[in-house]
Amino acid sequence: MIHLTTSQIEQELGRRLKRRRLELNLSQATTALQSGLSRRTITAVEHGQGATLATLIGLMRTLGALDQWDQFLPDPGPSPLALAGLRKTPSRRYASKPRRQPESPAAWPWGEAKQP
């Protein structure tokens, strides 16, 4: 398909969609009803007369072929920059003040102080 014109690719996709519809034993009217499209739109797509992305998605969903998008354009996963951002440890915003250590109990003179 790499050397075909846009029109030839549209016709080939239309033939493939029609073949899938017939494999499922669906009429154009039933496919139109289930997909929310008009029968005229189904006919136009099957004859390679172009389609919007929304039309193609609706048709593929109705024909049970929407999972084919994963083979066509697999999810690439997180980008390298996103992965690098996940690995960073959060930086401190400011340093905390040193904490005072409580005085030990031996430092308290509980009536043991000598009076002059």
Image: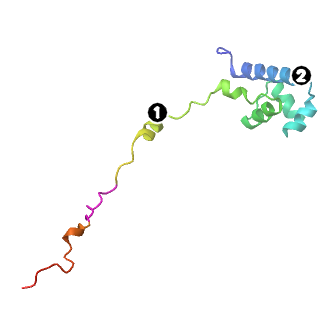
In the picture, the disc for residue 80 is: 1
Front in this rendered view, residue 59 or 104: 104
Viewer-closest of 9 and 107? 107
Q: Residue at x 90, y 38 (%)?
A: 33
Where disc 1 sits, the SS reads helix
Which residue does the image show at 39% across and 44% down from the upper left?
89
Residue 94 lies in magenta, yes or no? yes
Residue 49, placed above or below residue 38: above
Residue sitting at 21 percent across and 68 percent down?
106
- The dominant secondary structure in magenta is loop
Q: Which amino acid does label 2 sit on?
A: Leu
Q: In which quarter of the image is the C terminus?
A: bottom left
Q: In which quarter of the image is the N terminus?
A: top right
Q: Where is residue 80 in the image (x, y as percent from the top left)?
A: 46, 33
Frontmost residue, 4 versus 61: 61
User: Can you tell which quarter of the image residue 62 is in?
Assistant: top right
Residue 88 sits in quarter? top left
Viewer-nearest of discs 1 and 2: 1
How far across and down, in percent of the image, does residue 24 sit? Answer: 89, 24
Instruction: Report the residue marked by disc 2.
Output: 22
| Model colouring | rainbow
Residue found farthest to the left: 116
Please tell me whether residue 102 is drawn above or below residue 55 in the rendered image: below
What residue lies at 69% left-to-right and 28% top-to-bottom? 69
- Specify the amino acid type for callout 1: Pro
In the figure, is residue 37 to the left or right of 92? right
What range of the chain is rendered magenta? 93-101
Q: Could you say where residue 93 lies in the image, as x and y percent from the top left?
A: 34, 55
